[in-house]
Image (tube, grey):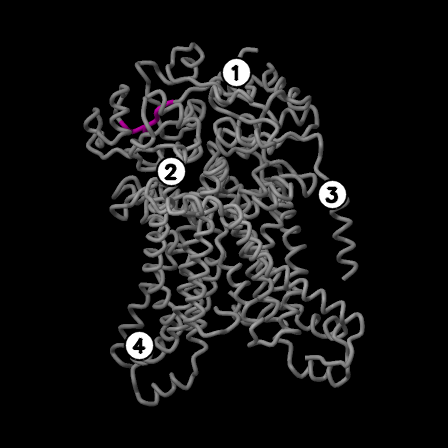
Amino acid sequence: MTRYWGILVLILTLAGCGPRTDKLVITGSSTMAPVIAEVAERYEAETGVQVDVQSGGTGRGISDVRQGLADIGMASRALHPDEDDLTAFIVAQDGIALIVHRDNPVPALNDDQVRAIYQGGTDNWSAVGGGDRPITVVNKAEGRSTLELFLAYFQLDNRDVQADVVIGENQQGIKAVAGDPAAIGYVSIGSAEYEAEAGTPIRLLPLSGVAARIETVNAKRYPLRRELNLVVDGEPGDAGRAFIDFAHSAAVADLYRDHYFVPAQR
Amino acid sequence: MHRSDRWAAALGVIPWLLVVAPLMLLLAALWQQGQDALSLAFLLEDPRRAGRAGGIASVLLSTGWILTVCLAVAVPVGLGCALFLSEEVHPGSAMARRLGFALDLLAATPSVVFGLFGYQFFAITLGLGFSILSGGLALSLMVLPLMIRSTEQALRGVPLSYRRAAEALAVSRWGWVSRVLLPNAASGIAVGVILSVGRALAETAVLLFTAGYVLRRPDSAFDSGRALSVHIYDMAMNVPGGTERAAATALVLVALLVSINVLIRRLVRRPFAGVV
Amino acid sequence: MIITSFLPSADRGLSWLLRLSALLSAASLGGIVLVLLWRTGPFLLSQGGAVLASGWHPGDGEYGMAAMIAGSLLVSLLALALAAPLAVMLAAWLRYYAPAMLRRPTLILVELMAGIPSVVYGLWGLLVLVPWINRWAPPGASWLAGSLVLALMILPLALLVTDTALRQLPPAWGRAGEALALSRFGVLRRVLLPGAAPAILSGVVLQFGRALGETMAVLMVCGNVVQWPHSVFDPVRTLTANIALEMAYATGEHRVALFVSGLMLISVTAALLILAWRLRGHDHAPQ
């Protein structure tokens, strides 16, 4: 019995007692989590500082940073005026695109049509130039910045949205649309382009005549753009600042481009 | 044979098919999606590119750590409680019933509630944050009733004659427990531990709020770590192109659970000796 | 029980250790309930009734959970309706009719099913079941999908419980039936199943509790729309999926509302447990 406890204590001691001090915790937007996780991998390989990246939504990133549960938050939007206790550092540009299944013949939708679809006024693809199929509306769960920005752009209230499926993470949305020829949803352009290139059967719809591609986001022509920010409470500490600088640097620009985001100019 | 019996025998195949077919389909679907990603390298390499490439070595390691913490708490406390029940408590007494109810309720509580509690108590109040410790501790609470119940059954399974013999020889309680009871119940206790491992491996919701999602190899129990089940969830839901790896990881997890099942069968002659 | 006239110190130490363990175990349950009550107390006192309304809009401070409570109940009830009869029929068939060499492998398979994690069932539901339902009735992610996956999950244990219950019946019953040249089916229907009914029902009630508490699988296949469904093909959101979906970023009142739903879940579980005990008798370890 004593031997058991002794070994246990030994293991836990050797394992390092106490939380590490040279560690960064980053939480937030599910759009940014995959790319920031890769940035963190590189950062760790270079400096040895441990970085933990977890998703959970922009809302969570902001809340964690305020509560001290995270050092840096990932927010896939600009900060609101009432978030002036936080400082944002933009690392990339992204957009939000409407996606439909690749086999869906509809070439484009105008703003009014989108509004009607999401509010339940239009419920069949035939009304907007597609086949005779009921539309499956995919909406995001509350607390996600993608939802906020989408609603703001189309001037919708979430109460009025008649959704058929509610998803949390971007990838869930992509899966929902890829698996249903009658679905429409909206996700980050970066995630969508990445998936479309990889062969997932989705198609990005143009918005106001502008194609939904990362080039048009870069050229500032695509109307529904958004910033990808790293946010901190007040001023970042040394460790935080070092990481944020790294996340901006040319050394990781290729990672953003791999994920179909536009790396921010420094 | 009565006619009704012939009908019953024949029609009974339908429920059988309805049950067996989905399971076969499930395994087949997983195999089809995940088999390309499976290899020895998959088990030995760390994940790269958020899990889209590489393997699951760090996930396996984190899972092992979480299990260790979980068992380190659940086994002694569970054993102690089971011994208490078998040695000091009379089977029909009020104490037995009250404790039994508390344990059964603990066993039946939804895992999200453990997630909420674990998050509030271990991660925030105790300040452990998202860590293997938080996850392991929360899991140990979930696994405790199972551990207690199967250990208690193992203990009660030791023949009464042994107990009478020990009494006749005026052996002390401690001697009885350490030299006779435990060794004889050892295989049953091992079954309890293994069942607990199986239960813990299957848990996802609890770990989402306590151990977190982090992919890297943990350096200590205070680090966050990703368990196999959480990895499956993340690959399926959160990472573009992650479906194949989710299926592959699911196959690994199922294989682990099957081995556990086989192990239990070796240790216990009757397949489900009342412990469910 | 070992009786010695005074306990040597090792025994006393052991006794204390054991009591402590038992206390810790019981205390963990108490701890959970306490923490839940502590977090939700003020909220419940000031606007407890509001959670029974229909509108869940945490952004606007509305925390009506009625639709989600309905979602949880409906998904679990349908799953139970699908799984329980199937489990009982299959258990009886395996025990009394099936060829011997089919019985053992099937039971092993069922045990295996019981051990498969919910996230794996959810993954399959997402990959296969939802698109399949989608072909007949979009969107696919729905109440039905949730119930089908849940049914698969609760069936194994329901079957094992029934098998155990049947096994524990006095063999004399079956033999008496044979002696009277009754059909096996008749004996089954009129004597054996009714005799095992309390144990079976108790097990089934427990599985219902388990279905109510299930999170991952329903999160992945139910659609997660907060609404009262008009048909089985409509998406729903369960209380459990809601917690998993929103816990990560809920703050303040929103988080407390989630704790309230957690409290609700554990209360319902307790009630079901009491029901199961009543049905079974007062064993310490109901199956």
Kindly identify which residue carries mark 1: A263
Question: Can the viewer see residue B252?
Answer: no
User: What residue would you read off at disc 4?
Assistant: C189
Nearest the eye: B7 or C8: C8
Tell me the residue at 42%/20% (across/down).
A95
* Relative height, residue C34 to residue C156 (above, below): above
Question: Under tag 1, what secondary structure?
Answer: strand
Q: Position of residue C284 (x, y in %)?
A: 53, 71
Residue C116 shown left or right of residue C91 in the figure: right
Q: Residue at x 57, y 75 (%)?
A: B93
- Residue A26: name its quadrant: top right
In the rendered structure, which segment of residues is drawn in magenta?
A97-104
Residue neighbourhood size for the residue with mark 2, other residues' Cα within 10 Å, grouped as few (<14), some (14–19), many (≥20): some
Query: Left or right of A244: which side holds C130?
Result: left
Q: Do callouts 4 and 1 mark residues in contact (Cβ within 8 Å)?
A: no
Q: Which mark is residue A15?
A: 3
Q: Which mark is residue C62?
A: 2
How crowded pointer 3 is (Cα within 10 Å; few <14, some 14-19, many 20+) is rated as some
Query: Which amino acid is tagged 1?
Result: Pro
**On screen, residue C128 above or below A47:** below
Q: Where does residue A105 sit, x and y in percent of width and height?
A: 26, 25
Q: Main secondary structure of the magenta part?
A: strand
- Amino acid type of the residue that numbered disc 3 sits on in the rendered structure: Ala
| Helix, strand or loop status at disc 4 | helix
